[in-house]
Amino acid sequence: PMDYPRVLPLPGYGTTRDCCCNDDRRYNCTVQDPWSRHRALLTTDMGAENIAVEGTGVIDGNGWPWWMRFEKTGLDAGRPHLFEPMFARNVRMEGTAGKLHVKDSAFWTLHLYACDGVTIRNVNVTADVHHGHNTDGI
């Protein structure tokens, strides 16, 4: 968590979505500061243009430590997303010469917030089926 600085919630989102845990799994769901969240692993400046993440291999969001804290002890702030450009234009994530594998995000995996001109191609998104709580793909 120390490697992921805290940032303000997204415009219009209010508190972190980690506070909403009324499901049958009975997670700890304690968030000390629900008005902040940890910055995404991969991010851009607001309004950035011509962003590309391309190639082959694996981008591992290392979600396990976050999932375990979420389930067992609670969080100090909302979990980070894996890739989150905001208000960006011409954003592309593309696997080349095969597929790009994006896996185990702590929270939402590819969160392209208010972006225009987005292309996602030849990308495989996965997360652990038992512990990857709320790790939506795109």
Image (spheres, rainbow, N blue to C red):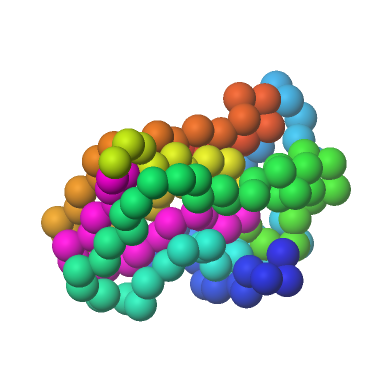
Q: Is residue 92 magenta?
A: yes
**In x, y percent, where is residue 100?**
39, 42
Residue that sits furthest to the top in the current view: 24
| Residue 6 falls in image quadrant | bottom right
Query: Which percent across, then down, holds residue 136?
Result: 46, 37
Residue 138 visible (yes or no):
no
**Visible in this render: residue 84?**
yes
Q: Residue at x 53, y 62 (%)?
A: 41
* View extreme (right): residue: 73
For residue 53, side relative to residue 102 (left or right) = left
Residue 8, image x and y in percent? 52, 72
At 56% from the left and 34% from the top, the residue drawn is 127
Would you say residue 62 sits in the magenta stretch? no
**Which range is magenta?**
79-96
| Residue 138 shown left or right of residue 72 in the figure | left
Picture coordinates of residue 43, whole percent (x, y): 43, 67
96 vs 5, nearest the viewer:
96
Q: What is the residue that sits farthest to the left in this orientation?
A: 117
Task: Name the residue: 43% across, 57% down.
Answer: 83
Name the quadrant of the N terminus.
bottom right
Most foreground residue, 81 or 21: 81
Q: Which quadrant would residue 71 be assigned to in this image?
A: top right
Q: Is residue 47 above or below residue 123?
A: below
Q: How many numbered discs, if any?
A: 0
Say which residue appears at 45% left-offset and 45% top-offset: 57
- Quarter occupied by the C terminus: top left
In this rendering, position of residue 72 left or right of residue 85:
right
